Image (cartoon, rainbow, N blue to C red):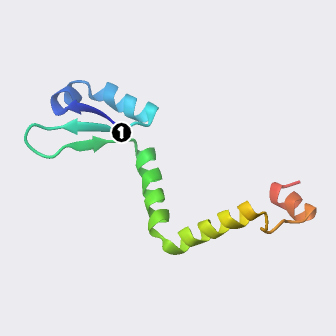
Amino acid sequence: MDSTTVNKFRDSLKSFVEQVVIHHTPLRVTRRSGSDFVVMSAEDWERDQETLYVLQNTSLMRQIAESSATHQAGSGYTPTKEQLDEIIGI
Protein backbone atom coordinates (compact mmCIF):
# COMPACT_ATOMS: atom_id res chain seq x y z
CA MET A 1 0.00 0.00 0.00
CA ASP A 2 1.33 3.39 -0.97
CA SER A 3 1.59 6.05 1.70
CA THR A 4 1.68 9.84 1.80
CA THR A 5 1.39 12.63 4.33
CA VAL A 6 -1.84 14.50 4.87
CA ASN A 7 -0.21 17.70 3.58
CA LYS A 8 0.89 16.08 0.30
CA PHE A 9 -2.53 14.44 0.02
CA ARG A 10 -4.30 17.78 0.41
CA ASP A 11 -1.99 19.51 -2.09
CA SER A 12 -2.43 16.79 -4.76
CA LEU A 13 -5.90 15.49 -3.90
CA LYS A 14 -7.09 15.05 -7.49
CA SER A 15 -4.05 13.07 -8.66
CA PHE A 16 -4.09 10.84 -5.57
CA VAL A 17 -7.79 10.09 -6.00
CA GLU A 18 -7.29 9.29 -9.70
CA GLN A 19 -4.44 6.93 -8.81
CA VAL A 20 -6.56 5.14 -6.20
CA VAL A 21 -9.55 4.76 -8.54
CA ILE A 22 -7.67 3.80 -11.72
CA HIS A 23 -5.14 1.39 -10.17
CA HIS A 24 -7.42 -0.03 -7.45
CA THR A 25 -4.72 0.50 -4.84
CA PRO A 26 -5.61 1.97 -1.45
CA LEU A 27 -3.60 4.90 -0.16
CA ARG A 28 -2.54 5.32 3.47
CA VAL A 29 -2.50 8.94 4.58
CA THR A 30 -0.35 9.62 7.64
CA ARG A 31 -0.97 12.40 10.10
CA ARG A 32 1.54 13.89 12.50
CA SER A 33 -0.93 14.08 15.35
CA GLY A 34 -3.59 11.44 15.17
CA SER A 35 -4.53 8.23 13.49
CA ASP A 36 -3.74 7.51 9.86
CA PHE A 37 -6.56 6.94 7.40
CA VAL A 38 -6.95 5.01 4.16
CA VAL A 39 -8.44 6.22 0.88
CA MET A 40 -9.91 3.63 -1.48
CA SER A 41 -12.37 3.60 -4.35
CA ALA A 42 -16.03 2.94 -3.62
CA GLU A 43 -15.92 -0.06 -5.97
CA ASP A 44 -13.04 -1.60 -4.01
CA TRP A 45 -14.74 -0.87 -0.69
CA GLU A 46 -17.96 -2.56 -1.84
CA ARG A 47 -16.00 -5.58 -3.10
CA ASP A 48 -14.21 -5.85 0.24
CA GLN A 49 -17.52 -5.61 2.11
CA GLU A 50 -18.96 -8.45 0.00
CA THR A 51 -15.86 -10.56 0.67
CA LEU A 52 -16.13 -9.95 4.42
CA TYR A 53 -19.81 -10.91 4.33
CA VAL A 54 -19.03 -14.20 2.62
CA LEU A 55 -16.12 -14.98 4.94
CA GLN A 56 -18.21 -14.28 8.04
CA ASN A 57 -21.17 -16.38 6.83
CA THR A 58 -20.31 -19.91 8.02
CA SER A 59 -23.23 -21.49 6.16
CA LEU A 60 -22.17 -19.92 2.87
CA MET A 61 -18.52 -20.86 3.44
CA ARG A 62 -19.58 -24.44 4.10
CA GLN A 63 -21.59 -24.49 0.85
CA ILE A 64 -18.60 -23.13 -1.07
CA ALA A 65 -16.27 -25.75 0.43
CA GLU A 66 -18.72 -28.56 -0.36
CA SER A 67 -19.17 -27.29 -3.90
CA SER A 68 -15.41 -27.08 -4.41
CA ALA A 69 -14.93 -30.64 -3.12
CA THR A 70 -17.74 -31.92 -5.34
CA HIS A 71 -16.24 -30.16 -8.36
CA GLN A 72 -12.75 -31.52 -7.69
CA ALA A 73 -14.14 -35.04 -7.31
CA GLY A 74 -16.11 -34.66 -10.54
CA SER A 75 -19.24 -35.86 -8.80
CA GLY A 76 -21.38 -32.78 -9.09
CA TYR A 77 -24.67 -32.33 -10.88
CA THR A 78 -24.48 -32.32 -14.69
CA PRO A 79 -27.39 -30.65 -16.44
CA THR A 80 -28.87 -32.17 -19.59
CA LYS A 81 -28.29 -30.58 -23.00
CA GLU A 82 -31.79 -29.10 -22.90
CA GLN A 83 -31.15 -27.58 -19.46
CA LEU A 84 -27.83 -26.11 -20.64
CA ASP A 85 -29.53 -24.65 -23.70
CA GLU A 86 -32.15 -23.06 -21.45
CA ILE A 87 -29.50 -21.69 -19.09
CA ILE A 88 -27.46 -20.06 -21.87
CA GLY A 89 -30.54 -18.96 -23.78
CA ILE A 90 -30.30 -21.04 -26.93
* 27 on left or right of 48: left
Asked if residue 29 is positioned above or below residue 45 in the image, the reply reads above
Q: Which of 61 and 22 is in front in this view?
A: 61
Residue 66, position as x, y percentages in the image: 64, 70
Residue 8, position as x, y percentages in the image: 20, 26
Asked if residue 36 is positioned above or below residue 52 in the image, the reply reads above
Instruction: Classify mark 1: helix, strand or loop.
Output: loop
Q: Which of 51 and 62 is in front in this view?
A: 62
Asked if residue 14 is positioned above or below residue 57 in the image, the reply reads above
The residue positioned 55% from the left and 70% from the top of the image is 60
The residue positioned 45% from the left and 45% from the top of the image is 43
The residue positioned 10% from the left and 45% from the top of the image is 34
Q: How crowded is mark 1: few (under 14 residues within 10 Å), some or many (20 or more)?
A: many
Asked if residue 49 is positioned above or below residue 24 in the image, the reply reads below
Query: Which residue has dot 1 on it?
Result: 26
* 39 on left or right of 83: left
